[in-house]
């Protein structure tokens, strides 16, 4: 790893890590009586903290050292991080691969041939300057705190490596507390402001989270001889597909469940009927990448079909996703269907 990357990682850690520390080691029992959601803009740190009953849930990080905006860390109601720590705040036993997999994010691997997905400061600058796009934070548009739900509205620009704006982004995050369950609804509108924009088919996208080591799927060796800290995760889709077989399948939602220590956790991503190519394809891997990708048709069908979605100048496309984080229990299909129905009705 080069020194520039190390410095950038440390720089990002200064602004994101302090939010993680106070939430660790607290009493794991969620306060179900108030569930006040406070959203705090910490401009000097270039982040926005989302607090539930005074405890960190997640932070919207838009520091200059990042090439996209991320939610990091993402915590359960008891304060357990479901997101991988590396490269911002490494934890023992974690994989140190794919440095562009940070927290929770939305971007894509082929926008007018530019790669937004794989971009990070680990990519040599010479290559980044011609091949990789970046998403620039423009402004915090609105912050609304409240009982059980808070709202954050932001604006971003998707830039080519030469600084040309390809897309303007308007995103609204809803942060919801439901007992010991936490919910994030992300509604993102992308607009082709200046020219035609083509999302060429690729598996590298789109709404994603890189999960903690224990939520990865275990290898056969780890299944046969498990030790503390080994992966415990498994996937189950709305269509009943399980394990690593979920990759490239289509489903209305996907449940990644496992336990971190003694805490049972379900991490669910829900697609929305108004989204393009609903039900979405899943770029869900055993090593900890958990992603919904409606645009990678060619890769997911082994070339039998293709999409190559094109937006003419002035046109917009909206993406709606819900992520559910339960603490203390694994969500049943019926419970997930209920959350998904509420999501469909709300937006």
Image (cartoon, grey):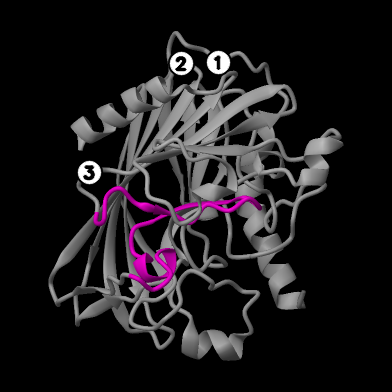
Which mark identifies residue 30? 1
Residue pointed to by mark 3: 273
**Badge 1 vs badge 3, beta-carbon distance below 8 Å:** no
Residue at image location 39% in from the left, 54% down from the top: 281
State which tag comes first along the sequence, 2 or 3: 2
For label 3, the SS is loop
For label 2, the SS is loop
Q: Which residues are magenta?
A: 276-304
Which circle, 1 or 3, is nearer the viewer? Answer: 3
**Badge 2 vs badge 3, beta-carbon distance below 8 Å:** no
**Badge 2 vs badge 1, beta-carbon distance below 8 Å:** yes
* Other residues around mark 2 within 10 Å, as few (<14) / some (14–19) / many (≥20): some
Image coordinates for residue 181, horizontal then vertical, percent: 47, 23
Residue pointed to by mark 2: 179
Residue at image location 50% in from the left, 69% down from the top: 67
Label 2 to label 1: alpha-carbon separation: 7 Å
Which mark identifies residue 16? none
* Other residues around mark 3 within 10 Å, as few (<14) / some (14–19) / many (≥20): some
Residue in front for this viewpoint, 163 or 324: 324
């Amino acid at each position: 790893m080069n020194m520039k990357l190390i410095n950038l990682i440390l720089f990002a850690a200064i602004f994101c890590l302090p939010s993680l520390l106070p939430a660790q080691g607290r009493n794991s029992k969620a306060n179900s009586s108030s569930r006040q959601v406070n959203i705090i803009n910490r401009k000097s740190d270039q982040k926005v903290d989302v607090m539930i009953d005074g405890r960190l849930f997640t932070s919207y990080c838009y520091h200059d050292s990042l090439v996209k905006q991320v939610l990091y860390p993402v915590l359960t109601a008891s304060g357990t991080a479901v997101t991988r720590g590396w490269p911002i705040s490494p934890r023992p036993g974690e994989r140190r691969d794919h440095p562009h997999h940070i927290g929770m994010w939305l971007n894509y691997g082929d926008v007018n041939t530019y790669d937004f997905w794989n971009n990070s400061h680990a990519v040599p600058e010479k290559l980044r300057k011609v091949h990789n796009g970046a998403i620039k934070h423009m402004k915090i548009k609105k912050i609304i705190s409240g009982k059980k739900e808070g709202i954050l509205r932001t604006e971003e620009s998707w830039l080519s490596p030469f600084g040309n704006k390809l897309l303007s982004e308007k995103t609204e995050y809803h942060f919801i507390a439901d007992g010991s369950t936490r919910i994030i609804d992300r509604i993102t509108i992308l607009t082709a402001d200046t020219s035609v924009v083509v999302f060429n088919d690729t598996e590298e996208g789109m709404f994603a989270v890189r999960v903690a080591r224990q939520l990865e799927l275990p290898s056969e060796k780890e299944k046969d001889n498990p030790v503390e800290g080994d992966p415990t995760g498994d996937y189950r889709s709305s269509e009943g597909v399980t394990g690593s077989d979920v990759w490239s399948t289509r489903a209305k939602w996907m449940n990644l469940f496992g336990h971190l220590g003694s805490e049972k956790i379900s991490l669910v991503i829900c697609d929305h009927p108004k989204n393009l190519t609903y039900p979405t394809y899943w770029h869900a891997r055993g090593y900890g990448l958990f992603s919904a990708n409606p645009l990678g048709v060619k890769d997911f069908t082994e070339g039998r079909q293709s999409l190559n979605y094109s937006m003419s100048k002035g046109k917009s496309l909206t993406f709606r996703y819900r992520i559910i984080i339960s603490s203390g229990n694994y969500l049943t299909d019926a419970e997930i269907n209920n959350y998904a129905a509420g999501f469909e009705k709300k937006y």
